[in-house]
Image (tube, rainbow, N blue to C red):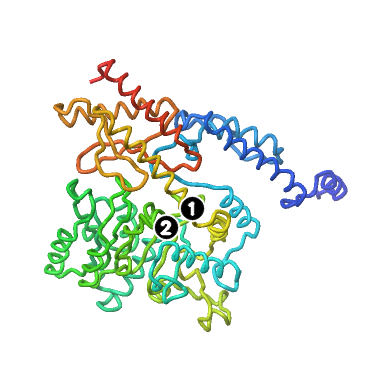
Amino acid sequence: MGSLDSNNSSQTQSNVPKFNPLDPEEFRTQAHQMVDFIADYYKNIETYPVLSQVEPGYLRTQLPENAPYCPESFDSIMKDVQNHIVPGMTHWLSPNFFAFFPATVSSAAFIGEMLCNCFNSVGFNWLASPAMTELEMIVMDWLANMLKLPKAFMFSGTGGGVLQSTTSEAILCTLIAARDRKLDNIGADNIGKLVVYGSDQTHSTYTKACKVAGIFPCNIRAVPTSIESDFALSPVVLRGIIEADVAAGLVPLFLCATVGTTSTTAVDPLSQLGQLAEEFDIWLHVDAAYGGSACICPEFRRYLDGIERANSLSLSPHKWLLSYLDCCCMWVREPNVLVKALSTNPEYLRNKRSEYDSVVDYKDWQIGTGRKFKSLRLWLVMRSYGIANLQSHIRSDVRMAKMFEGFVRSDPRFEVVVPRRFSLVCFRFNPNKEHEPVYTEFLNKKLLDTINSTGLVYMTHTIVGGIYMLRFAVGATLTEDRHVISAWKLIKESSEGLLRRSVF
């Protein structure tokens, strides 16, 4: 039997640099290099195709099959980022990105995220990081005041707010709270009778959340909308469906109303829906992921009229308030109902502060336990820019969208399909109104493919009420008037090219 040569082993180990994954001076050097890379990326972002031009599986052919056994240099890693990662990116921060909804950013939020990563707090309860919990409570009340929410949604009143990662989590948390409260009254064995409601324009994540919460798929109602109501949820139609469910022995549970639907930014009538929810003891959640941020401007606040009748509200500052992903604000009128449904209290987390209910433990306001110090981002954004500049930012995006809408309306070959409320314009190319809808849809599909293939602009589409339409969403932080003007020029040139080539 042999043995290890301790002398050789010691000699070998002495030649290997000591592993120090957090050397402050090395971090200082690499962080400076990274900041330079990021600043240059933002400065030169217009030189990249907005929509990535790579094919599926491209990256596997560029990188090794296995992780390196020995360390690689920072310069070598950054070279691969530039040569292999950047070409595979769809550049959401490009000023020519007009797809989906924007994911807005800012210097203040970036620095806030740096601080968040610096502290690396895992703030599941107050004791784990008091500043983390208390700053989040303060920031949530600040934003609630900016939105002119009732005191019933604030910690300074009888409610409170929490930062979730996404709207999906916000809906799931409130849905679970509503479910458990209802089952406490009717018995857990009646879960199969619970019915939930939304419109056919409610975000697709709603159905997913309902299934995760144990709602039977056959009891998830997607109420039809129409172009006559601008695709908003009709209280009259909803009432008929609820009454039919009650007559069938089912139990109405939850209604998700939307302020700014994904397809067309339709706004559901909150006040009327709230009255209906109160009448049938339904939990009303308002998903204002996109449109809610605009409501810090007085001229848009009317879209939240009736919010006092809601049980909960969520909006996503990463869509329009410059906060980077991920950041979803959720407020509830009755925190105790949410906490009762989601609380956990293992022995290893017990402490006197929590036991006496004198503090907020955010682990009981969310699905998971661990959480990041996300409120730093919002805090820095609010303090660095102030309400006035945030309002100006939103108004600027709306103004540019209105300008684009004017371009569309000025050309008789194009038409605006639904009214523009915020900074999304839904339109289509329709040069001959006598052609069949299938022809118009085909023409617009070809137009969209042509535009996106240039790499100069990225847009997306939707189908609502059987109508295929193009979506032009203004909101990327770097977008200026000239980008909107250039995009319209490209759209016109591409449409004229299609007609010249007689693609139909």
Looking at this rendering, what residue extends furthest in the bottom direction? 356
- SS at circle 1: helix
- Most foreground residue, 31 or 138: 138
Question: Which residue occupies 70% across, 43% down?
Answer: 32
Please determine whether, in this image, residue 347 is positioned above or below residue 263.
below
Residue type beneath disc 2: Ile
Label 2 crowding class (10 Å Cα cut-off): few <14, some 14-19, many 20+?
many
Question: Which residue occupies 29% across, 45% down?
Answer: 264
Residue 467 spot, x, y in % from top left:
22, 38
Label 1 crowding class (10 Å Cα cut-off): few <14, some 14-19, many 20+?
many
Q: Which residue is mark 2?
A: 296
Q: Which residue is mark 1?
A: 390
Please determine whether, in this image, residue 307 is positioned above or below residue 62.
below
Question: Which residue occupies 31% across, 67% down?
Answer: 310
Task: Tell me if label 2 and label 1 are in contact, CB under 8 Å.
Answer: yes
- Most foreground residue, 2 or 485: 485
- SS at circle 2: helix
Question: Which residue occupies 46% across, 60% down?
Answer: 164
**Of the numbered discs in the image, which one, if any, rests on residue 191?**
none
Residue type beneath disc 1: Leu
One can see residue 442 in this view: no
Please determine whether, in this image, residue 22 is positioned above or below residue 457.
below
Residue 222 spot, x, y in % from top left:
22, 55
**Position of 68 compared to 254: left or right?**
right
Q: Earlier in the sequence, mark 2 or mark 1?
A: 2
Residue 194 spot, x, y in % from top left:
24, 67
